[in-house]
Image (tube, rainbow, N blue to C red):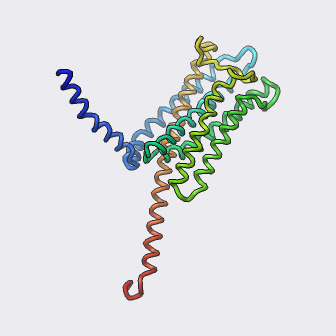
Amino acid sequence: MTERSTDKALSKDAPRRFQALLDLANPTRFLSLSSTILPWLSALTVLLLLAGLYMVWFAPEDYQQGLTVKIMFIHVPFAWLSMMCYTVMTIAALGTLVWRHPLADVSAKAAAPLGAMFTALALVTGSLWGKPMWGTWWVWDARLTSVFILFLMYLGIIALTRAMDDQAKSARAAAVLTLVGFINIPIIKFSVDWWNTLHQPASVLRMEGPAMPPSMLYPLLVMALAMTMLFFTLHLMAMRNEIFSRRIAAMRKIAARNAERENRKPAGEAA
């Protein structure tokens, strides 16, 4: 096949690939696809969680922190998910404002409570880990304060999406707030590098390589992957619930309008 014929074949396939993406944006198609994926994704999540907990159980103690270091294996994944979830919401916000994707608002609305939950768990486990290490449950340093602000951002977005009856207006308002709040994500990530804080610097993603031994690194990576799969599983389930709830609300509105029309009919016409 010549280069020109190859280009023609690719150009013919491009509309098909674009149409396939549009088909995936259809809520009905999404429900069908997610119902197929969810059992496999749930099974993978359970297997990874079991493997991660098994590896954490046999992970060595730290020579300074002792057993309390094992809080790291759930605290770090929770902190990672708190930022990843907001990044997913930011992409969904762009989909709402720029591309008018039918499922973008559904994705953002479904992700916000999950992000708030993981952020709260990161704050709680961080306090449990910080008490024996720092001698206090909380300090207003840059990392902890910026994560707390992230938690408040999640709560604000959740409140905003439920404050308006007009779904389109609430989706746009929440998308704008999400995009503005994304500035906090790099602040959280680099706060320990920019300011002098009690929080320890990055130990895994470093230019020099991980700063922890493989006996601790591998369980942490497995737990992070397991928690990430848990997020995507819960996110798909929440998106399905949101689609169903919107369909039920739309059906109730239609039924209410039909009932109102029937009540307005004259007695003779109704007979």
Using the image as rendered, state which of residue 202 and residue 54 is in the foreground. Answer: 202
x 46%, y 80%: residue: 263
x 59%, y 27%: residue: 53
As displayed, is residue 271 above or below residue 27? below
Q: Is residue 254 left or right of residue 12?
A: right
x 55%, y 29%: residue: 50
Q: Where residue 192 sits: x, y (%)? A: 69, 23
Q: How many marks?
A: 0
Q: Where residue 123 sits: x, y (%)? A: 70, 34
Using the image as rendered, state which of residue 137 and residue 86 is in the foreground. Answer: 86
Say which quadrant the N terminus sits in. Answer: top left
As displayed, is residue 137 above or below residue 203? below
x 42%, y 42%: residue: 34
As displayed, is residue 53 above or below residue 62? below
Q: Where residue 180 sits: x, y (%)? A: 60, 39
Q: Is residue 34 left or right of residue 202?
A: left
Looking at the rendering, which quadrant does residue 15 occupy?
top left
Looking at the rendering, which quadrant does residue 58 occupy?
top right
Extreme-bottom residue of the structure: 268
Using the image as rendered, state which of residue 229 and residue 143 is in the foreground. Answer: 143
As displayed, is residue 135 above or below residue 41? above
Q: Where residue 42 sits: x, y (%)? A: 48, 37
Looking at the rendering, which quadrant does residue 188 occupy?
top right
